[in-house]
């Protein structure tokens, strides 16, 4: 299994809603990541979890709250988002040690209305 | 192939020709580089990687060249096919740990029949 699975694929939410994005991998990877990608732009790193602990937060607003329940799962909780937060949210995972590639999921296309 | 220079957002090539996509990276401490392919509506897909102790690496129909002196990376695709149409990103990592990737701006490769 070399897949990173993200759900849902599409999400439309209002600015007062609370929603969660989910990510799952079963490759034994110990590092998991959230990236944000706007249209026609490269992915930008948001958070890094290493061995289930948050190791990097790239100055992301608190309306985005990551959670890593176990080594296979990664969530991103969303609350009080703004329309400019609309983007493709990508989850990735890697072994986290040494130079090895990160595997990406298909992303969640988020629209904030 | 055609050297399109750095940071060009679009590269158009004839089917069957070779493609060369260029990337400049900024961090001289980066020691691991990856090329990703991203098709419309999908997450980035790993193509090939290279470590800083190498200057060339070959895969199936793809070659990556690394010039650390000028901090330049290129991806060569041989005998370009319609399925190669996508946006191509280079990405860099420092230290080989779970620090996440920094992506370049991306190049949209268009294959002309």
Image: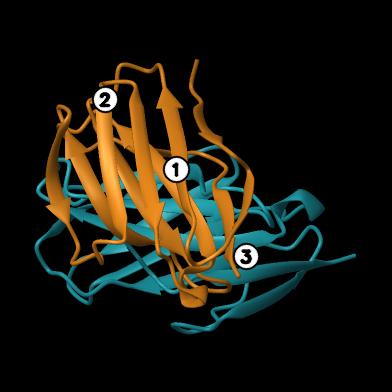
Chain colours: A orange, B cyan
Task: Place residue B96 in its image quadrant.
Answer: top left
Picture quarter with the C terminus of chain A: bottom right
Judging by the rendered image, the residue that carries numbered circle 2 is A69
> Which dot marks residue A20?
1
Q: Residues within 10 Å of mark 3 (few under 14, many from 20)?
A: many
Residue A109 % position (x, y): 60, 55
Label 3, label 2: how far apart the Cα atoms are: 43 Å
* Above/below status of A50 relative to A83: above
Instruction: Please give the name of the residue rendered at 45% of the width and 67% of the height, measured from the top-left corner.
Output: A42
Does label 2 lie on the same chain as label 3?
no
Chain name for mark 3: B
Residue A66 % position (x, y): 28, 45
Q: Are marks 1 and 2 in contact (CB under 8 Å)?
A: no
Chain name for mark 1: A
Judging by the rendered image, the residue that carries numbered circle 3 is B19
Please tell me whether mark 2 sits on a helix, a strand or a loop.
strand
> Which dot marks residue B100?
none
Please tell me whether mark 1 sits on a helix, a strand or a loop.
strand
Instruction: Please give the name of the residue rendered at 9% of the width and 48% of the height, measured from the top-left corner.
Output: B95
Does label 2 lie on the same chain as label 1?
yes
């Amino acid at each position: 299994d070399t897949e990173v699975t993200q759900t849902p694929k599409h999400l439309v939410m209002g600015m007062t809603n609370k929603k969660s994005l989910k990510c799952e991998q079963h490759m034994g990877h110990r590092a998991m990541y959230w990236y944000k990608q706007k249209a026609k732009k490269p992915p930008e790193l948001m958070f890094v979890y290493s061995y289930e602990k948050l190791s990097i937060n790239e100055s992301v607003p608190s309306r985005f709250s990551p959670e890593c329940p176990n080594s296979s799962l990664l969530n991103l909780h969303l609350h009080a988002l703004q329309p400019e937060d609309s983007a493709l949210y990508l989850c990735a995972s890697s072994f986290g040690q040494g130079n090895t590639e990160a595997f990406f999921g298909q992303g969640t296309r988020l629209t904030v209305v | 192939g055609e050297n399109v220079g750095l940071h060009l957002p679009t590269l158009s090539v004839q089917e069957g020709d070779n493609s060369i996509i260029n990337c400049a990276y900024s961090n001289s401490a980066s020691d691991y580089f990856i090329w990703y392919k991203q098709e419309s509506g999908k997450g980035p897909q790993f193509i090939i990687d290279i470590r800083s102790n190498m200057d060339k690496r070959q895969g199936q129909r793809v070659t990556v060249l690394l010039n650390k002196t000028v901090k330049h990376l290129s991806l060569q695709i041989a005998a370009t096919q319609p399925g190669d149409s996508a946006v191509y990103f280079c990405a860099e990592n420092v230290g080989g740990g779970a620090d996440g990737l920094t992506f370049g701006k991306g190049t949209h490769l268009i294959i002309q029949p």
